Image (spheres, rainbow, N blue to C red):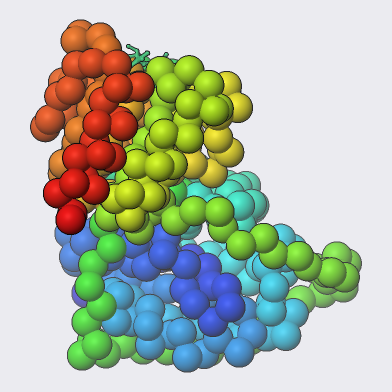
Amino acid sequence: MNKNREVWVFIEQEAGQIAAVSLELLSKGRELAERLGSRVCALLCGHGIAHLAEEAIYHGADLVLLADHPDLALYRSLPYARVAIDLVQARRPYIFLLGATPNGRDLAPRVASAVRAGLTADCTDLQIGDFRQKGRVYSDLLYQIRPAFGGNVIATIVNPEMHPQLATVREGVMRLGAPDRTRRGEIETIEPQFDGRDLVLQIVKREMQPPCCNLTSASIIVAGGAGMGSKENFQLIHELAQTLGGEVGASRAAVDAGFIAAEHQVGQTGVTVRPRLYIACGISGTVQHRAGMDQSSKIIAINSDPAAPIFQIAHYKIVGDLNQVIPWMIRAYHENAK
Ligand code: FAD
């Protein structure tokens, strides 16, 4: 095992549960580590969270660095950054993956700048490969793959020398592997060393808003775009979603037009989804929207324009006015359900 090429994953947790994105990154980390002949190390910070270490191992970690401390009970930039930076400086991982969540987006650049490493945000794929520059070959680098220039090109970014190779990834982008409850790993307890400056910020009050929708784990999504025409008409999307027992998605144009809240946006700057069935209504299907759709879903598209790009990826293509087609679908479903 090549311990010089460790793949680290920052484990986010809340209310006694590991965030889905961290489990997805453990699955991806496992794949990368196997390619490198190395191991996966999970960095788990918090308080009263020791029981989550086993869960990280079941999902792919070989080693869990467990920092269980009262000052880490809730995420705060400075103490969390102190733990991560001290460990990265001492142990020099090869790759460090974090979720592109508010906390991950806060922590990753702090670590990158402290250790003078590169960071690629919002990767949509991660692979291992070689890179040649000025006659020199850098083997087994992390290919950090993501859309660039408004989604018009897919860029592969490498960081040949300033390691660790840091990347953030949004929830739903990497596949979540099934936990293997027979896996065994090592748990190493870390004693964080804080100084007064790390603890200057105190959390006085915390208010949590329950999530308005759960697009990432929905098996059916009915999504509406600018073609819905108005917020009132967008009600048709809610009705169809309710009829089918699905969640409501939207294009950015629908969100920008005020038809629905931003949490419902699917795409490059929204959520990445993997339903079994995706019904796109009045959505043209630009690359930015498609970036959030999994092509293994069955896709039904309703669009009045037969040349709409969404039809290039749709399995069932309905060319027509959604104001007629959606009520027909709802009626047909009820009639067949009788
Ligand atoms: P339009 O492109 O306007 O398409 C509306 C469609 O409705 C048309 O195809 C039309 O034929 C059809 N239509 C109209 N009336 C009817 C009717 N009565 N019946 C049937 N069909 C009808 N977009 C996203 O969705 N998600 C993102 O995350 C995202 N991120 C972006 C990031 C960047 C950096 C940039 C530059 C853009 C991003 N966009 C994103 C915006 C994206 O480029 C498109 O502007 C957007 O997806 C278009 O939304 P739409 O398909 O709903 O609207």
Assign ligand 1 to one image quadrant.
Answer: top left
Instruction: Please name the residue shown 71% across and 60% down the image.
Output: 77
Residue 118 vs residue 207: left or right? Answer: left
User: Is the residue 129 above or below the residue 209 in the image?
Assistant: above
User: Is the residue 160 above or below the residue 62 in the image?
Assistant: above
User: Which of 1 and 65 lies nearest the eye of the viewer?
Assistant: 65
Answer with the quarter of the image where residue 48 lies.
Answer: bottom right
| Total tally of numbered discs in the picture | 0
Quadrant where the image shows the N terminus: bottom left
User: Is the residue 120 above or below the residue 94 in the image?
Assistant: above
Spot occupied by residue 97 in the image (x, y as percentages of width and height): 43, 57
User: Which of 216 and 236 lies nearest the eye of the viewer?
Assistant: 236
Spot occupied by residue 276 in the image (x, y as percentages of width and height): 20, 50
Spot occupied by residue 21 in the image (x, y as percentages of width and height): 42, 60
Answer with the quarter of the image where residue 290 lies.
Answer: top left
Instruction: Please name the residue shown 36% across and 45% down the image.
Output: 241
User: Is the residue 242 above or below the residue 134 in the image?
Assistant: below
Q: Is residue 2 visible?
A: no
Quadrant where the image shows the C terminus: bottom left
Residue 283 vs residue 252: left or right? Answer: left
Instruction: Please name the residue shown 19% across and 40% down the image.
Output: 332
Instruction: Please name the residue shown 40% across and 36% down the image.
Output: 237
Q: Is residue 203 visible?
A: yes
Spot occupied by residue 194 in the image (x, y as percentages of width and height): 76, 76
